[in-house]
Image (cartoon, grey):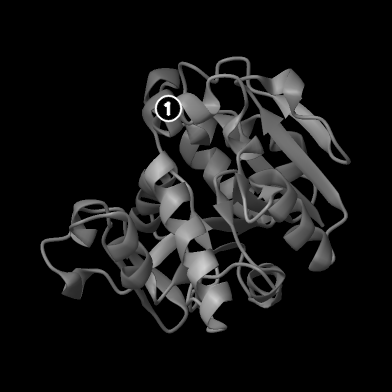
């Protein structure tokens, strides 16, 4: 079992925090994002971790393997994922964004589910989005899953009824699942692939009839996309510690 962490982008919305360091090296709860990620992956039983690097890539060193996306500044996350194709095509792979932190049980739930393409989603999304945005719907995307299968993802919701959860940034592919992704990408131009983000890819796969397993979780993770996110989370962690009461999205386990 391999784990791939997609860490090519700069994270420009972090502003000064990523001027001289990669986004995954920003700290929360006293540890870097990358340390939280590799810790959760290894605690779930994954010992081979591959980091796909780009911006300040040479600074990402540790007890993991690396590959590089030399076009990180002109391409999107899907291109970064294809840079790890040698791993995806040869063995099952868990894929993680580099700007999220999560618990090892989320990884285990994903590994234990069935299906050639899988993702986790948070049913308690609104509590986290309300902390990050004055209007949670301004950033949320449509999402629906029934019977453990993804039905809708990646649209702009008109109401909360269209958001049954939020995709977290944790994925899983078997070689067979990755082959279906590769078949789809082979039908696109290089420019189209450069512009393709991950939720758009998943949406297009659904339109082609792909089966994507949707694994629900309830809190215990967060996404750090801005300085404001970081400050809000640190405040909530400190408040939870002072009161001795758990925060729904406390990722520490």
The residue tagged with tag 1: helix, strand or loop? helix
Q: Is residue 103 visible?
A: yes
User: Can you give x and y, in whole percent of width and height, for residue 231 in the image?
Assistant: 44, 50
Q: Which quadrant: the N terminus?
A: bottom right
Q: Residues within 10 Å of mark 1 (few under 14, many from 20)?
A: few
In the rendered image, residue 169, in percent from the top left (x then y), is placed at 51, 54
Using residue 54 as the reference point, say whether residue 79 is left or right of it: left
The answer, for residue 10, to whether it is visible in the render is no
Q: Name the residue at 42% across, 27% down.
A: 15
Q: Is residue 46 left or right of residue 165?
A: right
Residue 38 at x, y percent in the picture: 76, 52
Report how many numbered discs are placed on residues in the image.
Answer: 1
Above or below, 35 against 191 in this view is below
Foreground of the two, 156 or 240: 240
Q: Residue at x 86, y 49 (%)?
A: 48
What is the quadrant of the C terminus in the image? bottom right
Please tell me whether residue 26 is drawn above or below residue 167 in the rendered image: above
Identify the residue shown where x is 17% and y is 60%: 157
Expressed as whole percent of the image width and height from the top left, the position of residue 57 reads 69, 22
To which residue does mark 1 refer? 15
């Amino acid at each position: 079992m391999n784990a791939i962490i997609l860490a090519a982008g700069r994270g420009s919305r972090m502003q000064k925090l990523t001027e001289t360091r990669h986004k995954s090296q920003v700290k929360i709860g006293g540890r870097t994002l990358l340390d939280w990620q590799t810790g959760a992956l290894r605690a779930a039983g994954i010992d081979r971790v591959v980091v796909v690097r780009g911006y300040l890539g040479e600074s990402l060193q540790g007890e993991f393997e690396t590959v590089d996306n030399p076009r990180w500044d002109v391409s999107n996350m899907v291109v970064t994922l294809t840079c790890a194709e040698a791993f995806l095509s040869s063995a099952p792979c868990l894929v993680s964004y580099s700007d999220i932190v999560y618990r090892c049980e989320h990884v285990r739930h994903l590994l234990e589910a069935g299906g050639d393409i899988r993702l986790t989603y948070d049913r308690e999304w609104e509590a986290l989005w309300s902390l990050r945005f004055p209007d949670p719907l301004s950033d949320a995307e449509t999402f629906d899953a029934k019977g453990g299968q993804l039905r809708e993802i990646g649209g702009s919701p008109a109401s909360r009824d269209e958001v049954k959860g939020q995709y977290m940034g944790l994925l899983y592919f078997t070689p067979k699942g990755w082959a279906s992704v590769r078949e789809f990408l082979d039908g696109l131009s290089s420019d189209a692939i450069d512009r393709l983000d991950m939720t758009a890819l998943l949406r297009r796969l659904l339109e082609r009839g792909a089966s994507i397993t949707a694994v629900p979780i309830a809190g215990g993770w967060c996404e750090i996309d801005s300085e404001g996110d970081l400050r809000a989370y640190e405040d909530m962690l400190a408040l939870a510690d002072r009161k001795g009461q758990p925060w729904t999205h406390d990722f520490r386990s």
